[in-house]
Image: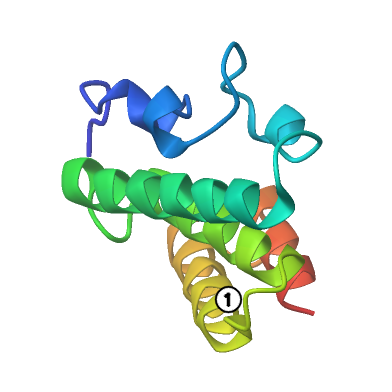
Amino acid sequence: SDCAQAPAILATPSKDAGLPDGDASPSSAASSGSGDDVAEALLHQARAELANAEGYCGKSSQEALCAASELAQLLDETATGEDEEAGVLFRRALAGYESLFGDEHEDTLCAAHNLA
């Protein structure tokens, strides 16, 4: 599917996600602000990106699989107690990449590594 018309939220976190003023980058957000608030804002943004990717590109699109993998990584890295959801998202990304690209593609191998 052609996702060229997907909204910018797929690529750029918004200020509405609760990230520090003047910087919409998740990596810099992790080093400033209160830990729980920043983690929650990042998770909220990642969930919004996943929903938008699914809505605009389809649940099995490369964009949605990438967003699912990124959300899973955030869930895995934060102490949210949502390990089960992270596992489901990691497995979904792996299965989707295998279906789209085959077993030897870089995205498939990365997803397999993330699941390990």
Q: Quadrant of residue 49?
A: top left
Instruction: Specify the farthest residue to the top.
Output: 22
Vertical side of 80 occupied by 57: above or below: above
The residue tagged 1 is 86
Residue 43: percent from left, percent from top: 51, 55
Left or right, 110 with respect to 21, comes to right
- The quarter of the image holding the C terminus is bottom right
Q: Quadrant of residue 65?
A: bottom left
Left or right, 34 with respect to 4, comes to right
Q: Can residue 89 be seen here? A: yes
Residue 21: percent from left, percent from top: 56, 17
Instruction: Specify the farthest residue to the front.
Output: 34
Q: Nearer the viewer, residue 83 or 36?
A: 36
Q: Going 70% across and 46% down the picture, which residue do you hit?
A: 34
Circle 1: residue type: Ala
Vertical side of 93 occupied by 36: above or below: above
Q: Going 26% across and 25% down the picture, which residue do you hit?
A: 7
Q: Going 75% across and 28% down the picture, which residue do you hit?
A: 28
Left or right, 78 with respect to 65, comes to right
Q: Can residue 108 be seen here? A: no
Vertical side of 45 occupied by 68: above or below: below
- The quarter of the image holding the N terminus is top left
Residue 72: percent from left, percent from top: 58, 66
Vertical side of 63 occupied by 16: above or below: above
Label 1, residues with CA under 10 Å away: few <14, some 14-19, many ≥20:
many
Helix, strand or loop at mark 1: helix
Q: Nearer the viewer, residue 23 or 62?
A: 23
Q: How is the image coloured?
A: rainbow
Q: Quadrant of residue 10?
A: top left
